[in-house]
Image (tube, grey):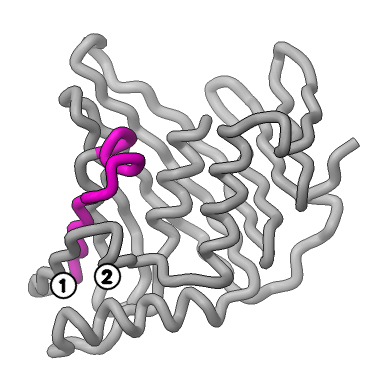
Amino acid sequence: MRKAITIFISTVLWCFSAMGATPDEVISKVNAAMQERSSVRLDFIQTRHTPLLKENLRSNGSICFAAPQKLRWEVKSPSPSVFILNGSKVMTSSSRGVSIKDISTDRRFQGIARNISRISSGPLVDTRSFDVTVLEGDMEWTIRMIPHRRDLSSLFKEIVLTADKGSHLVGKAVLLDGEGGSTTLEFSNLQFGSELDDNLFAIQ
């Protein structure tokens, strides 16, 4: 779960600059647009490839985020589950039951909470933590992010984001790990700045 949330934190980017912008301009406008968003809702399809398995693992669901520190990550199939972060509390719900914890009791959840806070308060495409390359194609922008901080490089060796030039939205993110595996997230039905029901983040 921690790795999945890290993927989310690293890939929910949007509103790229117009064609012809320099890499620095693209990064600057992505970060500025990110900080202007108070909420986001989207659907996703996640495909996990690992060399140990013959077939890829696929799942789908939805993500809701509200500043400053509310997150709902819901997997709808094949195995329904819900992860909710709301302030200092975390709830996980699956076929195995429901668990509610204070983030202070678990370092993993503390890390997730710090990353969530970054969405509202800091740059997402962080050139201090990543070596960032921006590539321009005929129909899309591609941002390659290679971590040079040890804590990040232990999770993944590269993140590749793809944004459509027409809509200026990120439609796909690929996270590559150091063991030959990859996780691909494809986004759809993106909604920004809309008011989200507090019940989506209720922990009880």
Q: Quadrant of the C terminus?
A: top right
- Place of residue 116 in the rendered image (x, y in percent of width and height, measured from the top left): 57, 55
Give the mark nearest the N terminus, 1 or 2: 1
187 and 88: which is toward the camera: 88
Q: Which residue is mark 2?
A: 164
Closer-to-camera residue (32/148):
148
Instruction: Reply above or below: 132 against 147.
Output: below
- What residue range appears in magenta? 140-156
The amino acid on which the numbered mark 2 sits, given as a three-letter code, is Asp
Which residue shows up at 39% across the image and 56% down it?
11
Give the image location of residue 165, x and y in percent. 24, 77
Q: Secondary structure at mark 1?
A: loop
The image shows residue 109, relative to residue 139, as above or below, that is above
> Could you say which disc has been placed on residue 139 in the image?
1
Marking on residue 39: none
Quick check: 59 left or right of 86?
Answer: left
Residue 162 is left or right of residue 97, and the answer is: left
Residue 59 x %, y %: 46, 30
Q: Amino acid at mark 1?
A: Met
1 and 2 marks in contact (CB < 8 Å): yes
Q: Residue 155: say if magenta.
A: yes
Quick one: label 2, few (<14), some, or many (20+) residues within 10 Å?
some
